Image: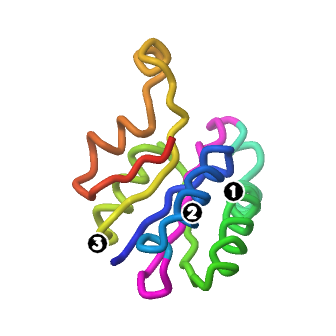
Amino acid sequence: MNILLAVDGSAYTKKMLAYLATHEELLAGTHQYTVLTVQAPLPTRARAALGKEVVDTYHAEEAEKILAPVGKFLARHGVDAKRIFKVGSVGENIAKVADTGKFDLLVMGSHGHGALATLVMGSVTTQVLANSKVPLLIVR
């Protein structure tokens, strides 16, 4: 299987990884893995003031802070994963990468906000469900 792991470095990412570690059928060297993190863009004025190179470096460094520990965890379990990051709308980018990357499964942790918080703020999980056709495993 070709599996996409959407991570954000939160406690929910750790729960998702712990779940994978206890389910050998999901965390096996026979599968292909891609780890994805998506960052919100900096405000337009900040980007303009700092310049493209500084902003790109910032996003790459912040992504590495999230991707490196996940990569180490997977390596300890004998998994070599491709690592990528995107900048933009989190839910939309996860869905787009899942669909265009021809993944068989998308795995992500969920913050599990209540109905009111989801109504007011939206939900990354809801956005992914609405925009992707890839089967989604949500770990809470």
Is residue 10 a member of the stretch shown in magenta? Answer: no
Q: Which mark is residue 102?
A: 3
Q: Is residue 69 above or below residue 15?
A: below
Task: Give amino acid for label 3.
Answer: Lys
Residue drawn at 55 percent across, 35 percent down? 111
Q: Residues within 10 Å of mark 2 (few under 14, many from 20)?
A: many
Q: Is residue 66 left or right of residue 129?
A: right
Identify which residue, 1 or 124, lies in the foreground.
1
Of callouts 2 and 1, which one flags the residue occurring earlier in the amino acid sequence?
1
Mark 1 residue type: His
Local secondary structure at mark 1: helix
Q: Quadrant of residue 40?
A: top right
Give the residue number, with chain letter if any, for mark 1. 59
Which of the two marks, 2 or 3, is nearer to us in this view? 3
The kind of secondary structure element at disc 2 is strand
Q: Are marks 2 and 1 in contact (CB under 8 Å)?
A: yes
The answer to whether the residue labelled 1 contacts the one labelled 3, judged by CB atoms less than 8 Å apart, is no
Q: Amino acid at mark 2?
A: Phe
Q: Comparing marks 2 and 1, which lies closer to the viewer?
A: 2
Residue 39 belongs to the span the image colors magenta: yes
The stretch of residues the image draws in magenta is 28-45
Pointer 2 residue = 85
Tell me the CA gap for discs 2 and 1: 9 Å
**Position in image of residue 120 (x %, y %):** 46, 15
Please name the residue shown 74% across and 66% down the image: 69
Of 108 and 54, the residue lying toward us: 108
